[in-house]
Amino acid sequence: HRDIKPANILIDRKNEPWILDFGLALRDDQVGFGKALVGTPVYMSPEQARRQGHRIDGRSDIFSLGIIFYEMLCNRKPFLADNLEDLIRQIVETEPKPPRQRNETIPRELERICLKALSKHAKDRYPNASEMAYAVEPASTGTASRPTPTMPSVKRRPARSPAKGFSAFAASS
């Protein structure tokens, strides 16, 4: 997609999330050949911010989901700057402040999931949104973590908390 952000997410009457605006999306056979700097800067992945079009794939969207998840947990974005150059530098070089340092009531597992999605290196992020949602679901209900299967079966459900709402969104993307 390359431009995952709250403005591109619609929640329908059944609390089901829908991703909008596929104008920047690439087909699988186009990955690595798109424009280098596209998307909304505050939601860009480090590889987008570095203009490394050849490294942009679905895990770039996981980073953007991580920013949205951080906002849901902390009520603020992880990277804030007065100008584009400083914002890009933060996205590429600065680790976000851990969510529990902003709000100690955030469960440790949700913090871990959020920070994994915000990893600077794509290889360290979740490979897809389903696996991220699969990790979020038990953490949002207070149950123990479970191993991540190759092809998880994630149920969508109405949003009752930021983590549950995020889990439903990620499962649908």
Image (cartoon, helix red, strand yellow):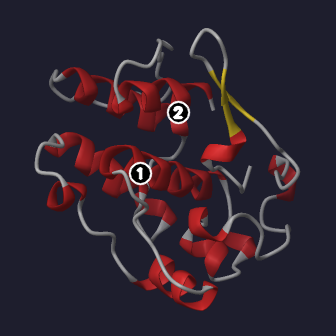
Q: Quarter-wise, where is residue 17 in the image?
A: top right
Which residue is found at the position 83% from the left and 52% from the top? 26
Inspect the image, locate mark 1, and give the three-letter code of the amino acid beneath it.
Glu
Q: Nearer the viewer, residue 68 or 154?
A: 68
Local secondary structure at mark 2: helix
Which residue is found at the position 46% from the left and 22% from the top? 152
Percent x, y of residue 77: 43, 61
Percent x, y of residue 7: 68, 45
Nearer the camera: disc 1 or disc 2: 1
* Image quadrant where one finds the C terminus: top right
> Is residue 92 positioned above or below 54 on the image?
below
Residue under numbered circle 1: 71
In this rendering, position of residue 40 left or right of residue 15: right
Percent x, y of residue 67: 47, 56
Q: CA distance from mark 1 to mark 2?
A: 15 Å
Find residue 113 and name its label.
Answer: none
> Is residue 142 positioned above or below 6 on the image?
above
Which residue is found at the position 47% from the left and 17% from the top? 154
Find residue 170 and name its label.
Answer: 2
Percent x, y of residue 96: 33, 70
Inspect the image, locate mark 2, and give the three-letter code of the amino acid beneath it.
Ala
> Which of marks 2 and 1 precedes in the sequence?
1
